Image (cartoon, rainbow, N blue to C red):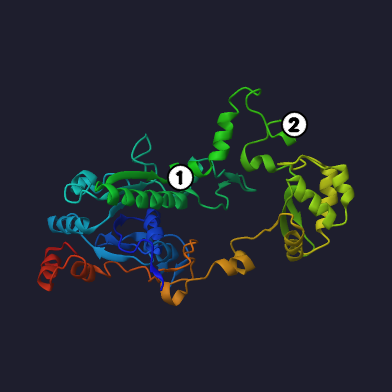
Amino acid sequence: MAKPAPLAGVRIIECSILGPGALTTHLVDLGAEVIKIESPAGDYIRRMTWPIVEGVSLMHLHINRGKRSLVLDLRTPEGVEVFRDLARTADAVIEGMRPGGLARKGLGYDDLKKINPKIVFCNISGYGMTGPYKDMPSHGIAYDTWGGLVKAETDDEGFCYIPEHPSTGIHAGPLFGAFGVVSAILGARATGEGSALEIAQSDASAAMDWLRSETWKAYERPEDEVTGNPSDNFERRAPGTAGMRDGVRYQFYVTKDDRHVLFMASEQEFWKNFCDGVGRPDLFEKWPGSQYGDHAKGNRELQAILREIFLTKTAEEWILFGDDKNTPIAPVNTPQTIAEDPQFKDRFHWMPADEVGADMLGTPLKFMDVDMPKMTKAPTVGQHTDDVLSSVLGYDEAKIGALRESGAIG
């Protein structure tokens, strides 16, 4: 018999706008109950960015799947009191907006821990709770430009533009936050004491790109203390992936079917396997390379030879070759083509649009003997107000009616 989902029995109260709500997406995927508190106007994520699927944004459908929506007007004392009642039952409260909004309503961590000593309070915002940028308005791309991950490019008319790029901070911030919240809940259950934490999506962007920034920092030290790789005769390369530009045995190559593969024979063993596999042991004899981390940097003669070799097979044939000969050759996909990749098809299963509003991917975590929750469509504004008040708080119809009359629940 399958076990319940890992976070079954965990209750999260979320007050968020836009992307920061993704923090609890990771938790609801693992079985947590997430109650999204919305103002009567609702989170405008439903109208934000593209695509719009049957009148509702994909961002909302993805980030808020599986959650329940409760309308509370926290400008009313009745609405504040309902929030307090919910916090008494909760493991954590998530404030997904600029810091301090809940505290100004008497619902910050210091307020809530008086009624629930085990409460975990997490703020997730753009730039965090400290520093000169803490109150600045921002959007997701800002955290990656701040972190040095996205550079401005210029078109043929001389105008700057934002190039296509994977978003990092807006995704990594919620992921770090989810990890922190679960850790804090474990601590609270063990000690009886909750805690407060915060995560800035800008910080997450920088943390994910630690190799480049830490390399630049290391290069501030003298060259007799910090060098390059032994395979490069200890010459310093540019940090991170920038140092791979001139690689040869670790590089893209065009294939027979006009696609690309990524060749990664930087270890001597893999390089020998490749040379033997294509019937060119002479290449290994001439350029054996170092045992580890050798990209044959700048060897144009070898690169020209490899370019011709890779044109002799299709991308699919090279993938099979690499698997058979034990030499790393990887597919090169785009966000559009990856869905047809056989590895993707094996590992990911689309949640169907008729169940969650749009075809979307779930958590990449896979539990072998756990009954994982089935996701529901992201809620409309206040869709679960009456249900949450009655099933979670035990309010009767009269009390719910009085709250509606007061305007506390819209």
The furthest residue to the bottom:
354
- Helix, strand or loop at label 1? It is helix
Mark 2 Cα-neighbour bin, 10 Å: few <14, some 14–19, many ≥20: few
Q: Is residue 402 above or below residue 179?
A: below
The furthest residue to the right:
282
Going from the N terminus, do you reach mark 2 or mark 1 first?
1
**Quadrant of the rendering where the N terminus is positioned:** bottom left
Q: Are marks 2 and 1 in contact (CB under 8 Å)?
A: no
Mark 1 Cα-neighbour bin, 10 Å: few <14, some 14–19, many ≥20: many
| Residue 233: image tag | 2
Q: Is residue 246 above or below residue 234?
A: below
Q: Position of residue 188 (x, y in %)?
A: 28, 49
Residue nearest the observer in this picture, 410 or 22? 22
What's the amino acid at mark 2? Asn
Residue 96 seen in this snapshot: no
Q: Is residue 30 above or below residue 155?
A: below
In the displayed structure, does residue 302 sit left or right of residue 141? right
In the displayed structure, does residue 75 sit left or right of residue 38? left
- Helix, strand or loop at label 2? It is loop
Q: Position of residue 181 (x, y in %)?
A: 35, 51
Q: Residue at x 41, y 68 (%)?
A: 372
What's the amino acid at mark 1? Ala
Residue nearest the observer in this picture, 260 or 31? 31
Q: Residue at x 78, y 49 (%)?
A: 271
In the displayed structure, does residue 104 sit left or right of residue 197? left
Quickly name the residue at label 1. 204
Q: Position of residue 52 (x, y in %)?
A: 45, 67
Q: Residue at x 46, y 71 (%)?
A: 358
The furthest residue to the front:
1
Q: Position of residue 247 (x, y in %)?
A: 74, 43
Count of numbered marks: 2
